[in-house]
Amino acid sequence: MARNNTEVAWADPALLILTSLAGGPKHGYAIIQDTEEQAGITLGPGTLYGALARLEERGHIRALPGEDRRRPYELTASGSAVLAQRLKAMRNLASQGLARLRTAQP
């Protein structure tokens, strides 16, 4: 799934996929490429397609008509709301963690 073991702990495939699709509809391979470019994390096909199925079941993404063998997906309003909520929570956690690190430094 990821390039090294430290990235695995921080990589949430659903969050990576939603973030990728926030930039517009993409098929599986394009999501893999985008995630590699933006986050430095390589999603394997099993991880990617399992997460896509779960996100689609929850109504966070929807499949668009396919082209050849490629099936693009797009973010839904629900997916956009979930992504915004998760990213805000991550930003708050990062801010709190960085503030604690600053105060803990000698």
Image (spheres, helix red, strand yellow):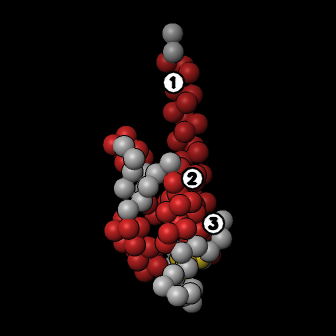
Q: How many labels does the image show?
A: 3
Q: What residue type is labelled 1?
A: Leu
Frontmost of labels 1 and 2 is: 2
Q: In the picture shown, does residue 59 fall above or below 89?
A: below
Residue at 53% across, 50% down = 39
Q: In the picture shown, does residue 96 fall above or below 81?
A: above
| Element type where label 1 sits in the image | helix
Q: Mark 2 points at which residue?
A: 37
| Element type where label 3 sits in the image | loop
Q: In the picture shown, does residue 103 fall above or below 98?
A: above
Is any atom of residue 11 visible in this view? yes
Of residues 68 and 28, the one drawn nearer to the viewer in this rendering = 68
Q: Mark 1 points at which residue?
A: 101
Frontmost of labels 1 and 3 is: 3
> Mark 3 packing: few (<14 Cα in 10 Å), some, or many (20+)?
some
Q: Residue 22 carries which label?
A: 3
Of residues 70 and 10, the one drawn nearer to the viewer in this rendering = 70
What x and y, as percent, mark residue 105?
51, 15
* CB under 8 Å between discs 3 and 2: no
Q: Residue 61 carries which label?
A: none
Residue at 49% across, 72% down = 28
Q: In this view, does 49 lie to the left or right of 102?
A: left
> Mark 1 packing: few (<14 Cα in 10 Å), some, or many (20+)?
few
Q: Which amino acid does label 3 sit on?
A: Ala
Is any atom of residue 82 visible in this view? no
What x and y, as percent, mark residue 16?
50, 59
What x and y, as percent, mark residue 14?
46, 63
Q: Which amino acid does label 2 sit on?
A: Glu
| Element type where label 2 sits in the image | helix
